[in-house]
Amino acid sequence: MAMNINWYPGHMAKTRRMILENLKLVDVVIELVDARIPYSSRNPDLDEICGNKPKIIALNKSDMANKDATLKWIDYYKSLGDVAIAIDSITGKGFGALKQSVNVVLKDKLQRDLQKGMKKRPAKMMIAGIPNVGKSSFINKLSGRAGTKTGDTPGITRAKQWIRIPGGYELLDTPGILWPRFEDEITGLRLAFTGAIRDEVYDVVQASYSLCEFFKDNFPQNLMERYKLKTVENLLGYEILEEIGKKRGCLVSGGEVDLERAARIFLEDFRSQRLGNITLEFPEDITKGNCKDNDRP
Ligand SMILES: Nc1nc2c(ncn2[C@@H]2O[C@H](COP(=O)(O)OP(=O)(O)O)[C@@H](O)[C@H]2O)c(=O)[nH]1
Ligand SMILES: [Mg+2]
């Protein structure tokens, strides 16, 4: 699947350098992931890039994910010794807990600073994440400003600015924009389903077949209710998409189903929670090898 279209080694090296440079300026990194695909939306190299710098994993878009699944992921990260918090960057839900976590991960450092006689100063943070995970939304919501230039255009350099956050925090206004995983088919599909990669760079019909199969295996009821289907039990992905197309009147002359139109409707329904709050992957998928790493996400 051609999803690494925007990332080439030179660009990755440049991004890596920029993040390394910014790391020196901050106390903590907030890594945004998509709560619907916490594994697939994580950059594979960020842990290594961050080194010993304290880090918090923020499961963003948690309003779109399944609540129990999000709790499972948080427990999972905890079991690895990581700190993870569920947030929603549109409403700001979870931001209080996130700030608390910043205090917790920096506690020892702040105490050492005080013992050394240093004055209390704001905790400096930066955020990082793959495209479309919600970095700009997060910065805007946390800072309380209406809108900001996105830092998504490679090559544009601006003066670094600190955004003051009430409660003793400062946030670097430029997020670290990271490449997504592009290692296997299933990861690519999950990034596609959630809109992390543009629809133009993959086959929406093929992707929809897979998403239909996922729903058939995990949430058949949601499909049946949404599209008034009697059963999906013995149908293959493409047959389900055909049924969806028929129900939605996506027909071309001759009575054939316009699969492309059906696929776009289906994906849009998924992305706007009309099929429910769905998390696409679970911590146990990683150990089962349903996600690529047999190590950790
Ligand atoms: N429902 C929901 N949508 C979000 C959330 N955070 C971001 N979005 C949406 O996700 C899309 C990408 O967000 P953006 O901030 O531009 O991502 P960036 O590329 O990482 O800067 C936009 O349509 C946002 O409105 C969230 O927590 N919940
Ligand atoms: Mg942005």
Image: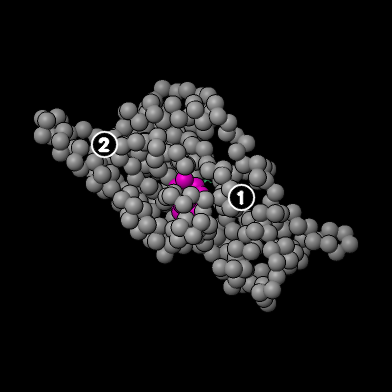
Which numbered disc flags the more N-terminal residue, 2 or 1? 2
Q: Residue at x 39, y 52 (%)?
A: 87
Q: Position of residue 152 (x, y in %)?
A: 52, 33
Q: Is residue 293 left or right of residue 126?
A: right
Element at badge 1?
A: helix
Q: Position of residue 83 (x, y in %)?
A: 32, 49
Q: Position of residue 86 (x, y in %)?
A: 38, 54
Q: Is mark 1 within 8 Å of ligand 1?
A: no
| Viewport quadrant of the N terminus | top right
Name the residue carrying label 1.
185
What numbered label is drawn on residue 14?
A: none
Question: In the rendered image, which quarter is residue 262 located in?
Answer: bottom right
- Up/down of 169 relative to 243, above or below: above
Q: Which residues are magenta?
A: 33-42
Q: Residue at x 24, y 46 (%)?
A: 104
Q: Amino acid at mark 2?
A: Ala
Q: Is residue 255 left or right of residue 89?
A: right
What numbered label is drawn on residue 123?
A: 2
Q: Residue at x 33, y 49 (%)?
A: 82
Q: Nearer the viewer, residue 173 or 65?
A: 65
Crowding near pointer 1: few (<14 within 10 Å), some, many (20+)?
Answer: few
Task: Specify whether residue 146 is in view.
Answer: no
Number of numbered discs visible in the structure rendering: 2
Task: Specify whether residue 237 is in view.
Answer: yes
Real-space CA distance between mark 2 and mark 1, rounded to the nearest whole angstrom: 40 Å
Whether the magenta-drawn stretch holds residue 172 is answered as no
- Up/down of 66 relative to 106, above or below: below
Q: Is mark 2 within 8 Å of ligand 1?
A: no
Q: Residue at x 74, y 54 (%)?
A: 260
Q: Nearer the viewer, residue 79 or 142?
A: 79
Instruction: Check the image and tell me how it is coloured.
Output: one colour
